[in-house]
Image (cartoon, rainbow, N blue to C red):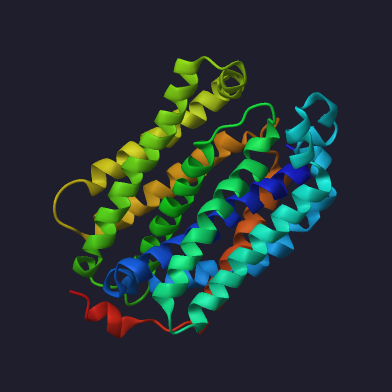
């Protein structure tokens, strides 16, 4: 893995987590304020880190040729795809994705009409997350295009955001009562099943259709290292489901289940992104440094946000 790829892995992972948090926030506002209240501060803080992602994405604009083969191989692409994947158009779209998400996050915390803004935001964020997944992830291998990939990748970000918010809430000095989190625990379990099923459905479609480009995408992720990474990710997810599925809610189960879901997300995302030549010590340090910077900004924003403790304690 090159230095640019290390920055890319950190950027995509954290951008997905921030976008997923914004989706959780909007879904929570539309469904029920009581449902959202226990983790509202956490998902708001994560969504408000979007301006940091604009900063983290800037260096990548100067290394697109190291990340995306289509920069040097556009002549081998179908004409329409070659136009879509032109460098200038790609950068314009990427900037638009980040600005839309950042704008929605700040609008949502300032408006009094949260349900109305959330409805508009979901209508915008669904295509934004799908096209961001196509551009930032799937276009690394531009000869294959899947209509399900964007949904699967976006759903995984929502799952990770919810798991992260629950985990952070329980690690706080004064966490919300586990009984107040029961709806969130069921939502986490449902999203876990749905995420696994969506990725499996994507694989089945490629297998049944026997599409060379799709089969090649999976074949390139089938060496011993990649298969080990994939197996580890689904063992972690199986562990999370086993921990979360029994009836009743406990602090230990929600802590363990959320942590396992996040570990699943990290290993599975690494498998999907497939950085070349593994991780050296320098590149591992870059990824961890990017993560630490994001966490520092997240904590700073969290301290400036209301706790919503009163709303959480009054939840039915």
Is 140 on the left-hand or right-hand side of 308?
right
Q: Position of residue 153 (x, y in %)?
A: 51, 43
The answer to whether residue 48 is visible is: no
Is 104 on the left-hand or right-hand side of 281?
left
Q: Is residue 1 above or below residue 176?
A: above
Q: Position of residue 192 (x, y in %)?
A: 34, 45
In percent of the image, x 75 and y 27: which residue is there? 78
Q: Judge by depth and name the residue closer to the eye, 169 or 195.
A: 195
In percent of the image, x 44 and y 85: which residue is there? 112
Q: Residue furthest left?
A: 247
Q: Is residue 21 above or below residue 303?
A: above
Quadrant of the rendered image containing residue 254? bottom left
Quadrant of the rendered image containing residue 72? top right
Q: Position of residue 191 (x, y in %)?
A: 34, 48
The answer to whether residue 59 is visible is: yes
Q: Position of residue 33 (x, y in %)?
A: 31, 74
Is 215 on the left-hand or right-hand side of 117?
right
Which image quadrant: the C terminus? Answer: bottom left
Q: Is residue 45 above or below residue 199?
A: below
Q: Judge by depth and name the residue closer to the eye, 171 or 7.
A: 7
Q: Residue furthest front?
A: 80
């Amino acid at each position: 893995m090159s230095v640019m790829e290390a920055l890319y892995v950190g950027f995509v992972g954290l951008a997905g987590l921030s976008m997923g948090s914004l989706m959780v926030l909007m879904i929570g506002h539309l469904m029920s304020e009581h449902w959202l209240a226990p983790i509202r501060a956490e998902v708001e803080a994560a969504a408000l880190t979007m301006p940091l992602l604009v900063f983290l994405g800037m260096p990548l604009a100067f290394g697109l040729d190291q990340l995306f083969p289509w920069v040097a191989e556009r002549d081998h692409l179908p004409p329409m795809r070659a136009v879509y994947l032109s460098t200038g158009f790609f950068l314009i779209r990427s900037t638009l994705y980040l600005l839309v998400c950042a704008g929605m996050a700040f609008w949502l915390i300032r408006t009094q009409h949260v349900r109305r803004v959330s409805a508009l935001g979901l209508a915008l964020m669904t295509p934004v997350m799908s096209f961001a997944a196509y551009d930032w992830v799937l276009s690394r291998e531009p000869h294959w295009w899947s209509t399900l990939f964007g949904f699967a990748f976006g759903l995984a970000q929502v799952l990770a955001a919810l798991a992260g918010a629950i985990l952070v809430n329980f690690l706080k000095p004064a966490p919300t009562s586990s009984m107040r989190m029961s709806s969130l625990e069921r939502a986490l379990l449902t999203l876990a099943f749905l995420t696994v099923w969506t990725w499996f459905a994507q694989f089945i479609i490629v297998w049944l259709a026997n599409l060379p480009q799709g089969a090649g995408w999976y074949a390139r992720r089938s060496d011993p290292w990649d298969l080990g990474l994939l197996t580890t990710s689904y063992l972690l997810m199986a562990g999370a489901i086993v921990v979360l599925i029994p009836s009743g809610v406990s602090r230990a189960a929600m802590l363990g289940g959320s942590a396992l879901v996040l570990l699943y997300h990290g290993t599975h995302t690494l498998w999907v992104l497939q950085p070349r030549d593994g991780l050296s010590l320098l590149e591992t340090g870059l990824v961890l440094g990017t993560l630490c910077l994001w966490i520092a900004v997240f904590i700073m924003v969290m301290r400036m946000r209301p706790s919503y403790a009163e709303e959480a304690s009054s939840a039915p």
